[in-house]
Amino acid sequence: MKREELTELFASKSLTILPSRYDTLNLVALESLFSGCPTAIGNGAGVCRFLKESFPNVPFLTIDIDDIYASLPNLQKVLDNYEDYREELVNQLSQANLEVKDPDLEDIYNNTSVSHTATQEELAQWYTQLLSYWESGQAGFSISKIPVIKTAKTQVKKQLKPTYKQLKNTIGQAKAKLKKPLEEPKTAQTIKSVQLFEQYKNTFKASELNQKDLGAKVKQFWKLASAFGEAEQGLRDKLKNGYRIDRVRAWREIARLEELRGNELVSATYKLRGLRLLDGDRFGDLPYILRVLQEKGFTREVEVIDAMYGKAGQREEKCYDFIEKARQDNLHNQEWDYEIFDDRRDRSEYRVSIIVSLYNAAEKLPLFLNTLQHQTLMHSGDGEIILVDSGSPGDEYEVFKQLAPQLNLPILYVRSQARETIQTAWNRGISLAKSPYLSFLGVDETILPDALETLAHELDKNPDIDWVIGHSLVTNVDKKGNWVNDIMPYHRTPYQQDLVYLETCYLSWVGALYRRSIHDRFGYYDGTFRGAGDTEFKSRLLPHIKSKVIDRTLGVFWNYPDERTTQSPAAEIEDMRAWYVHRTLAGVRYAFAHRTPEEVEQLIYLSLAYRKSYCGHTSSDLEYAYNLSLYLKEINPQSEALKYFKGIETLLEAYRSLDWMPKLSRFSPLEKVLQTRNLAKQIQEEHLGTWDEDKSLGLKPDYRIFNDNRHEQHAFLWLTKVETTEES
């Protein structure tokens, strides 16, 4: 900003917030404050000490950088009494002596303060040694050889090390952004495809004599594969992005090696991907997958995978029966017993219930609850908190008992005797809630102070809406919950509910609120899920509810540096019954049985040109568009939208052939990539000729191969531990 713009800003009805942790001085704080603008400054900034020493009567707010939420009450007081506070600030500034006179050099050097005396002595020592070395005329004279200077250099390096490391990380992140798979230049895979055949030759021939060899060979295939999960960011930085073509071959080879290493669940996950991508069991992997999953306790996943990829003539019927049975099985909640039931609520009714599942959450619980106490709806007494301890081995209850008196909030703490899933804990919380509106959070998630009040107001004035949500932000925090950096936002506008069929994060729980009555009408959570139960719940209920997005950021994810349940092969396997079965023709039939053909058409358009809530580019979902078109053919064979069906079918088959190339030679991968790119361009131009952007929220088809959902979901690697010692 220019100085004039800053002056205008500070003169307006504003509050400047500078959550500084390390700033030596922070001139913006001084400019704001001395312009008469109320200012809040992080206590890590040197300007705080400067102001207290030099201008003790000039009021400013201090933010505890290690507990930012604790400053909210003081900020609120300023906002509530803004004019009075600003008037007092201006009065104090008018009385303060803001005229600064620079001291003369003679004054500086004659200053006899302890700090200046020490500096003078040190400078004298440096100067004496410098003269001594210079006058000696010794060969190879260098200032850096002087002992005090050498020591000083070491100290400076030590001080700069964190800054250098931070700079290096920043550069690394910038490079990583340039190499992001989803934003990879169009020609990258084309250029690299020529090398694939030779890479395969070298990698497939690698030794497998012992566990060390197997581990080394797995690593080689990681280099060949195309993407890494968020949890493997560090390793991704070390390995170059690999090939995103002929993925089924690479994944099946990783599966074979993982099986030899004893990692059968990981092996089955990779083989299952081959079934999904090719829509069938081309390699006879289904019996192995079903056996492994049955042995690992994934009995329901075995049932749904067999329905999806078993006997072809029975697929649709079996898939529909599976979906319908899941609906029937979860229509009712159950009676629950408790090991601990500590009820500190004092009312029979509340407006909003916040339901929280606890497991190994003792360290995170204080920050979480201290943050919730700033909810405006909690201040008014209209909110309750229900903590469900799912048989945790930690000491959450002891932490709660210490916090409860100072929080003085209406909280119910319950504990189950044995460990339970998150969705089971949520079902318990629903049965205990005294409110018509429900919010669900984990201790690694939070909401803005007015979030619940804003969301509840939206439900109050829209009785036909069941679920409301704002935008949310994912942040990295340290072990204490202190902010480190932002990762990405979930931006959900423009919004249509059917976008959730394309990308589930459009409708979520963090920064959201829904009516408790949807459970009475349409069922509860499926507690048999370990990590994907939230996705299944949305898939099951979406045909029956109405949702809305508020164009405000209301939710925040605290990404602590520990492992998350949803980042595992188990969660991907569970997604077969939570997500993928709902994308089949049977799933489409379930979702749109009571909806109009026009609504099916609308979702076909969105499938060909939509934006994921956490991305900026245009994606496609040809697999889902294909199944939607098959269903539309049945209910309205004359539909105008079916003019896109041939292109959808052709391009989908081309994408599948790019994922599995049976016969390889040196130039066949290049030929296949070029052929697919040209085909995609041709079909894109055909579709654009009759495209109406209003039907796809202002977007238009952009058929880049690697922007299709088959490359944007479950395409990363599950990295397993590789032994470094030789084992026979």
Image: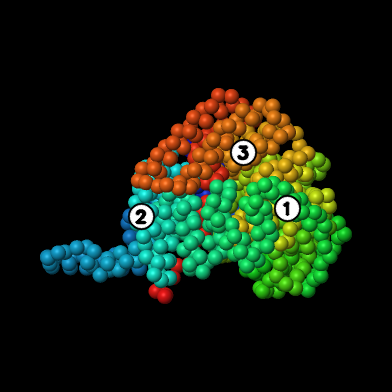
The residue where tag 1 is placed is 322
Residue 40 x/y as whole percent: 58, 52
Furthest residue toward top? 689
Looking at the picture, which amino acid does disc 2 mark?
Answer: Lys
At 39% across and 58% down in the image, what residue appears? 204
Question: Toward which corner of the image does residue 8 lie, by quadrant?
Answer: top right
Q: Is residue 490 above or below residue 429?
A: above
The residue where tag 2 is placed is 201
Looking at the picture, which amino acid does disc 1 mark?
Answer: Phe
Q: CA distance from mark 1 to mark 3?
A: 21 Å
Question: Toward which corner of the image does residue 150 lie, by quadrant?
Answer: bottom left
Residue 645 x/y as whole percent: 60, 32
Disc 2: CA contacts within 10 A as few (<14), some (14-19) or many (>=20): few
Position of 253 with respect to 549 (left or right) is left
Instruction: Say which label, 1 or 3, has the lower sequence index.
Output: 1
Residue 626 bears which disc, if any? 3
Looking at the picture, which amino acid does disc 3 mark?
Answer: Tyr
- Quadrant where the C terminus is found in the figure: bottom left
At 68% across and 71% down in the image, what residue appears? 392
